[in-house]
Amino acid sequence: MYQTILYEKKGGIGLITVNRPHIYNALSKEVLGELLDAVNDLEQDSEVRVFIITGSSEKAFVSGADINELQNLTPAGAVNQMYLGQQVFSRIEQSSKPSIAAVNGYALGGGCELAMACDIRIAARSAKLGQPEINLGNMPGWGGTQRLPRLVGTAKAKELILTGDMITGEEAVAIGLCNHAVDLEVLMDKAFEMAEKIARRGPLSVAYAKKAVHFSQEMSVEAGMVMEAFGVGLCVSTEDQTEGVNAFLEKRKPVFEGK
């Protein structure tokens, strides 16, 4: 079905693998379109609770945008290309399904921006992350100037963007860019372990909580707490909440159905 990604579903977990190892999984228009299509499919599948995005080789998660496409763009074409990537990454970020980036290698430029659009980032210790566009006389265009400061703070974001320096998976954890750093050999095990844990939670409460956290960056604390309160009100009305409370009282594990 797809030419540039691998897409499968395993027991409530979606797995998207960018599959262009010959050019370090660089993001082209075709890759972006297929990513968008896969995420839209995941969003509509009630059996999928969470999804993982990774790269197809040990060397690269996603090395960045496809330079072959970028080098001949007109100014207007470049703007449209940036809008396309922003649309796809925002779709990932705003999905009701939680997403995990399993960063197995180079996550540079658009690759780092793709990882930042995911809710949780787990990196190999040996992975390299960064926004090196400045080294090519350009700048981040798929959300790097917006998401990176929110994750690591303005000062550190400026340092990484203005120097173009790369950091390891362990350094990314230290500054708050990634959640965990593990040996490459166990990266996917760790990602699936996290995904399975989230998949066992109530999908409606997970979606509402994710939305509240996302919008906390865009509104005042007071407005965010109003949204939080209404989220709790919605959760109380669900069968999942009844199941969760009953399971707690009966000392058993809950079985959530997203109702």
Image (cartoon, rainbow, N blue to C red):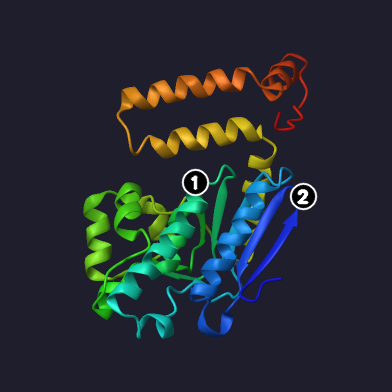
The image shows residue 45, relative to residue 114, as above or below, that is above
Counting labels gives 2
What type is the residue that disc 2 sits on? Gly
Q: Nearer the viewer, residue 72 or 19?
A: 72
The quadrant in which the N terminus is found is bottom right
Q: In this view, does 61 lie to the left or right of 110?
A: right
Q: In this view, does 185 lie to the left or right of 93?
A: right
Residue 205 rendering spot, x and y as whole percentages: 59, 30
**Furthest-top residue in this view:** 249
Residue sitting at x 53%, y 20%:
232
User: Which element carries disc 2, helix, strand or loop?
Assistant: loop
Sequence-first tag of 2 and 1: 2
Residue sitting at x 67%, y 72%:
2
Residue 241 rendering spot, x and y as whole percentages: 67, 21
Q: Quadrant of residue 141?
A: bottom left
Q: Mark 2 points at which residue?
A: 11
Residue sitting at x 65%, y 35%:
203
The image shows residue 44, relative to residue 132, as above or below, that is above
What type is the residue that disc 1 sits on? Gln
The quadrant in which the C terminus is found is top right
- Residue 94: mark in rendering: 1
Q: Which of 90 and 188 is in front in this view?
A: 90
Residue sitting at x 68%, y 64%:
7
User: Which element carries disc 1, helix, strand or loop?
Assistant: helix
**Residue 104 seen anywhere in this rendered image of the structure:** no
